[in-house]
Amino acid sequence: MNKLTTIAIDAMGGDFGPPVTINGLAKACSKVGNIHANIYGDEKIIAQHINKYSNLGDNTNIFHTNEVVPMDVKPIDALRKIGKESSMWSSIESVSRGESEAVLSAGNTGALMALSKIILKTVSGIERPAITALWPNPEGDTVVLDLGANVDVSPNQLVQFGIMGYAYAVCVLKKDNPKVAILNIGHEDTKGTEDLKIASEKLSSIFKGDYIGFVEGDDLSLGKSDVIITDGFTGNIALKTAEGMAKLLSHYMSTIFKSSLRGKIGMIVAKNAFLSLKDKMDPRGNNGGFFLGLNGLVIKSHGGADATSFAKAIEFSINLARSNISNKIEDLIGENI
Amino acid sequence: MNKLTTIAIDAMGGDFGPPVTINGLAKACSKVGNIHANIYGDEKIIAQHINKYSNLGDNTNIFHTNEVVPMDVKPIDALRKIGKESSMWSSIESVSRGESEAVLSAGNTGALMALSKIILKTVSGIERPAITALWPNPEGDTVVLDLGANVDVSPNQLVQFGIMGYAYAVCVLKKDNPKVAILNIGHEDTKGTEDLKIASEKLSSIFKGDYIGFVEGDDLSLGKSDVIITDGFTGNIALKTAEGMAKLLSHYMSTIFKSSLRGKIGMIVAKNAFLSLKDKMDPRGNNGGFFLGLNGLVIKSHGGADATSFAKAIEFSINLARSNISNKIEDLIGENI
C-alpha cells in the first residue's frame, strides 16, 4: 500500500477554478488511495464544492487566501502587485515549509515559474529550472525539456537539463539505462550551433553509451530517445507545433468523414475507435508539465483543463511525490557537476 | 493557354533516380500542358526510361553528365570533389544560362543549396537564400521560411525572409494583402529574443497592417497568417516535429482501428475517407520546398519522393516559373531595403 502523500493544490488557478480543481480532486481520490490535499483559495467557495463529493472532507484542509493570480498577468506583476496573498504563492510556500510534498496549479505558467523560483530556489548545481513534459511516442513517453522557461541557455544549462531528465526517466519512468539526446537539425556531429556541440561533448563524457547524440524534430514523436533536451525557445515552438498539427489532423478527420455517407456510417460503426483516437490526439490527455530543478516539486496543469484532465495532473503529482527524483537529481549533480 | 515553360530536372537526384524522376515527368506532362524538360544525368538510363512513356520525347532534351551527388555527401565535398561534372551542377547551370526557367532536384538538400548559391548567387539585397515551403492549414497553405538553410539569422535577414514570403504569397498564392508574422513563443511584444523584437519593428514599418506580429507554433497549422518567418534552426525543428506528429497519429489510427471488430468494419465501410485522411497526413503530399532569394528558381523535392510525389513537385516548379515572383521580390527589395 502506498504511504499517505500530501499535495498542495492552488484551487483558484486555471480557466475555471474550484468547480474544476475540486471535482478533479474527487476524481483522483476515487482512483488513487492515500491522498491528503492542502487546498488554497477562497475558503467559502472551496468548501461548497468539497461538500458535493462524499470522498472529500477528512482528507482535505482548506487554507483561505484573498488574492488570485490572473491568467494573463505578467510574472513580474504577479510578484510585485499580488504577491504573498495569492493562492498560488501560499500553495508553493506549503512545499517550501515541508507541509506538502508537491504543489499543483493550473494557473499562469510564467507566474508559477517566477514565484516557484523565489520561494523554492533552484537545487544546488542547477542554474535554472526547466519546464518538462512527457511527449507521447508509439512505445510510451519521452521526457522533453525545456519547453519554455529559458529562451537562452548555455551548454552547461543544457547539460543540467540532461541530468534532470535522466533522473526523471530513472525514478518516474522506471528506465534502467535511459537514453539521452539533444534536439538538433540533423544527426551528424557537425550540425547545429557551437553551444550544442559543446553540450554534446559534455553529455557524452557524463552518460557514455546512454548519450545517443543529436536527434531531429520527428524523433520527439517516434521514441528514439527516453530524454530529449533543448532550449526553451525551440522546445516551446516544437510543443505548440505538435499541438497545432494534432488540431489540424483532427479537423481533417471531422471534415473528411462527415463529407460522405460511407464516412458517416464508418464513424457510427467504429465510434469507440474514433473516440479513442480523438483522446490520443488531445494534448490535454497527457496533462501535467512539471518544473524540474527546484527544491520542491511544482506541477503545472493546462489552464483549460477540465476535471478529468485535472485529475490526471493530480495523479501525476502524486506519482512524482512518491518517486525519489529529488534525491536522484542531487546525487547526479554531486557526481557530475 | 499557358506559354511553353522549360524546366531543368536533375534526373539522378533522390533515393531512386530516373525510374522515379522520369515517371514523375510523364505523370506531370499528362496533367499540365506546354512543359519542356531539360534532363540532366546518365543519358543511356534516362533515354531507356523516356522510351517507356508515349507522352515524352519531343518535349525533352537529355544532357549527359558523368557524376552524381550522393544523398549523404557533405555540401563542401559536393563542391570540391564532385563539382561541375554532376547532374545537379549542370541542371542548376541551365537556369543561370537562361536555358531553363526553374530547376528541380530530389537530391541532397545541403549540396543543392551550396551549389545553387555559387552558381546563381543571391538576389541583390538578399544576404542569404531561405528554404521555403507551403504548410497546410484548414483554409489553404501558409508560406513558411526558413526551414533549415540558416542556423543563425540577423534581424535584417528575417526582414528579407518576410519580403520574399510576401512576394510568394502575392504571386503564387494570389493573395491581395497577405498577412506576415514572426514565429515566437508568445503573441506579446515582450516575448522572445531581442533579434525577433528588432525584426518585428522593421517588418511593422514595411508592411503596416499586413504585419500581424508574433504567432506561436500551433498557428503554423491553424492558418493564422499567410506568411510565417523564422530562423532555419527553429523552422527545421518545427517542420520535422510536425512530420513526426503526423506519423505518430497515423500509427495510432492504424493500431486503434485494427484492435477491434467494429473498428475494422468501420475502416472497410469508410475506406475512401481513411485513404483521404492518410493522404492528408502524408508530408510528401505537399511535395516541393523551394529556395527563395536566388537569381533563379530552385525547387527541392523530398529525396524519398515516389513518381506521384515527384510529379507534384514538377507541377509546383511550373507554377513557380509561370509566376512573377522573381520580379516581385526585386521590386519589394528595391522599395524597402
Image (cartoon, coloured by chain):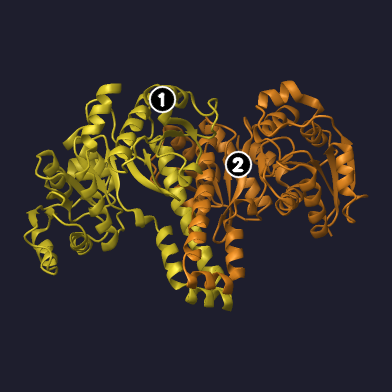
Chain colours: A orange, B yellow
**Residue B36 place in picture, x, y as percent:** 11, 53
Whether residue A296 is situated above or below residue B87 in the rendered picture: above
Q: Secondary structure beneath disc 2?
A: helix
Residue type at mark 2 is Ile
**Quarter of the image where one finds residue B150:** top left
Secondary structure, mark 1, is helix
Report the side of A56 relative to A237 (left or right): right
| Residue placed most toward the observer, A175 or A207 | A175
Residue bearing the label numbered 2: A163
- Amino acid at the residue labelled 1: Lys
Q: Is residue A176 visible?
A: yes
**x and y percent of residue B320 in the render?**
23, 45
Q: Is residue B249 left or right of residue B39?
A: right
What x and y, as percent, mark residue A1?
Answer: 84, 60
Classify 10 Å Cα crowding around label 1: few (below 14), some (14-19), many (20 and above).
Answer: few
The x and y percentages for residue A71 are 68, 34
Quadrant where the image shows the C terminus of chain A: top right
Q: Which mark is residue B208?
A: 1
